Image (cartoon, rainbow, N blue to C red):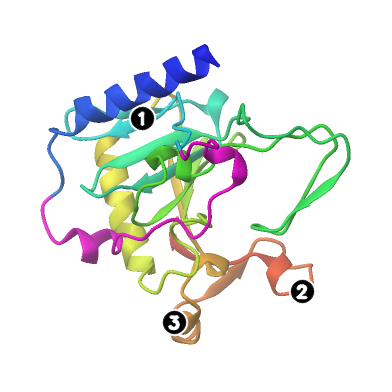
Amino acid sequence: MKFLRYLSATALLLLMAVAAQAAPSGNLDELYGTLQKPNYVKYYEVSTKGVFWIHPYLQVATDGNHGILDPSLAPYNFVIDTDGNVRINIESNNPWGRTYDYEWFRPEDFSNRKKGSSEKDGHVTTLGGQDGRIGGEFLWDKKAKTWTINNKSGRYSNANPDRTPDQLLNAVTRIQEVVDLTEGTWGEVRYLFRYSPKELREEFQKKYEISFARPEKEDFIQKDPYILLRK
């Protein structure tokens, strides 16, 4: 536990060090969405004393302190923070979480998990439970050698009324300014319908062409509908 406390303290020092870095100009609420509390917090992301786990790998990408994506560590999570910086972690096993000795179902993304899989760090650990703007993932396509960006964040994107395709594209612009790649190039930008505001889905269906990750599936959720914003 001393090791865990040391890592958390290191992460906090990092947050303090980058606080003075330059942030993007413009109305951040319009660019990346208004600040929202996480939609939920998992039991292993906060201690019994109310202290949030902060990911020890945490990167805060700014103009003066770029983030780095390495395919060997993918996938990554990202959230745009209060000041318009890009916070990044990797989806590693959380030390306070469980490892399951049976197959299990993860309700937040409707996914089936294999026996031996563990509970992983999510977007909350990039912010220590603080408010955030739009969030999502960086996914590595090994075959195409490209990085896909999406809006998959059950904490900061899902169910928030102002998380729009334009805001994801604004976030992508910022990301490409302050995040460097060790390999490959930037690829598709996918706005996942499941993580869009329910109030705006009918409007989006009229405005955009909807694609499906798994069109052979009959159930709407399992098709993973998305809007391809950039190829």
Q: Earlier in the sequence, mark 2 or mark 1?
A: 1
Q: Is residue 140 visible?
A: no
**Of the residues tagged 2 and 1, which is closer to the observer?**
1
Q: Is residue 110 covered in magenta?
A: no
Q: Which residue is mark 1?
A: 59
At x 57%, y 68%, the residue is 194
Q: Are marks 2 and 1 in contact (CB under 8 Å)?
A: no
Quick one: SS at disc 3?
A: helix
Quick one: SS at disc 2?
A: loop
Q: Is residue 42 covered in magenta?
A: yes
Q: Amino acid at mark 2?
A: Asp
Q: Are marks 2 and 3 in contact (CB under 8 Å)?
A: no
At x 12%, y 38%, the residue is 22
Pick the residue in front: 144 or 69. Answer: 69
At x 60%, y 38%, the residue is 44
Q: Which residue is mark 2?
A: 219
Q: Quadrant of the N terminus?
A: top right
At x 37%, y 69%, the residue is 164
Q: Is 117 left, or right, of 135 in this rendering?
A: right
Q: How far is mark 2 from mark 1, CA to CA? A: 37 Å
Point out the stretch of residues depicted in magenta.
25-50
Residue 121: x, y in percent? Answer: 56, 37
The answer to whether residue 61 is above or below residue 23 is: above
Q: How far is mark 2 from mark 3, CA to CA? A: 21 Å
Q: Are marks 3 and 1 in contact (CB under 8 Å)?
A: no
Q: Amino acid at mark 3?
A: Leu
Q: Amino acid at mark 1?
A: Gln
The answer to whether residue 157 is above or below residue 123 is: below
Q: Is 89 left, or right, of 73 in this rendering?
A: left
Residue 110: name its quadrant: bottom right
Q: Which residue is mark 3?
A: 200
Q: How far is mark 3 from mark 1, CA to CA? A: 32 Å
